[in-house]
Amino acid sequence: MKWTKRRWGYVVWGVALFFVFVPEILAAIPLTESQLPFPTISRMTGHLEYAHNEWEIAPTVFIVFTLLSLLRVPVRQRSGGNDEATLLARRAAGDTRPHRTPGGRLTFEPDAKTAEAFDNEAVSSWAFAARAAAAAAVTIALTLWALHHWPNQYVTDGSGNRHKLPNFHVAYFLYGSIGFFWLLLPSVSGLLAGKDAQFPNLFRTAENLEQWIAKPRGPAAVARLLEVLAWLLAFALIWGMVFLMLHLTLYPFPNITHILNPGG
């Protein structure tokens, strides 16, 4: 069986967002965060920034780079479909501006394949699943190794209740592996070699999902409702990403206001 790269994008980013957002949502429930098997990515980042001051600028660098790249090189406006001869002529004339790979990633290498052709290109499910399983196996192995090397620690309070301390080492390896396989490796490969991963980037995947939901079908009222739902989905995804970035930068935002001004 073969799936298109568009569909694999939904699976890849769905899994990644699950490991990021589900723990964050559960941690918002009182007394739940301490029961999670690993700290949330925001708490891990907050701990890293507290322990090493130089990491405090990392979230802002990521935010600015992402926003600037989307502003200067929109995801679909110049994704794929670039005439290779034209791009080579631009390079010869001294134009070194980046553009997008067919999968939506920043690159300096020309590629004539369109974004639509990339999205609809079939990929062997067995081959993709094997590569995904290998990446997952490495991630799980590193996480379990970290847990073995740095076992969970517990403290007992004055009432005799036993509490588990957050194991940040496990979180470093878990989220670090996800960031490496899902973000860093495909982005660097596209930027330096113009070689795409076999799934679109996160923003292209979100846009693909929005367009699929808004695709006209059924009566006019249903089609209009689907357009509204597609817009709300895009809003929810963008709002979630922005909130997460603020949460990482100003951890523990939004509770930081109560910490800075506990008297109200």
Image (tube, grey):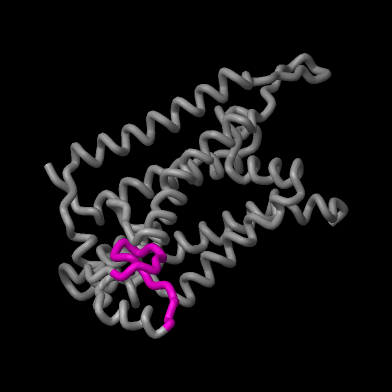
* Residue 260 seen in render: yes
Q: Residue at point 21% right, 39% down?
A: 127
| Residue 160 appears left or right of 27 | right
| Farthest residue, direction left | 1
The answer to if 109 sits in the magenta stretch is yes
Q: Residue at point 62% right, 61% down?
A: 61
Q: Residue at point 62% right, 19% down?
A: 151
Q: Which residues are magenta?
A: 94-110
In this rendering, the answer to whether 93 lies above or below 72 is below
Q: Position of residue 186 (x, y in %)?
A: 39, 52
Which picture quadrant has residue 132? top left
| Farthest residue, direction top | 160
| Farthest residue, direction bottom | 93
Image quadrant containing the N terminus: top left
Image quadrant containing the C terminus: bottom right
| Residue 121 appears left or right of 67 | left
Question: As rendered, which of 256 and 185 lies closer to the eye?
Answer: 185
| Residue 88 appears left or right of 174 | left
How many marks can you see? 0
Q: Position of residue 77 (x, y in %)?
A: 34, 77
Q: Position of residue 15 (x, y in %)?
A: 39, 43
Q: Residue at point 42% right, 30% down?
A: 138
The answer to if 225 sits in the magenta stretch is no
Which picture quadrant has residue 209? bottom left
In this rendering, the answer to whether 183 lies above or below 91 is above
| Farthest residue, direction right | 263
Question: As rendered, which of 112 and 36 lies closer to the eye?
Answer: 112
* Residue 254 seen in render: no
Question: As rendered, which of 51 and 158 lies closer to the eye?
Answer: 51
Q: Main secondary structure of the magenta part?
A: loop
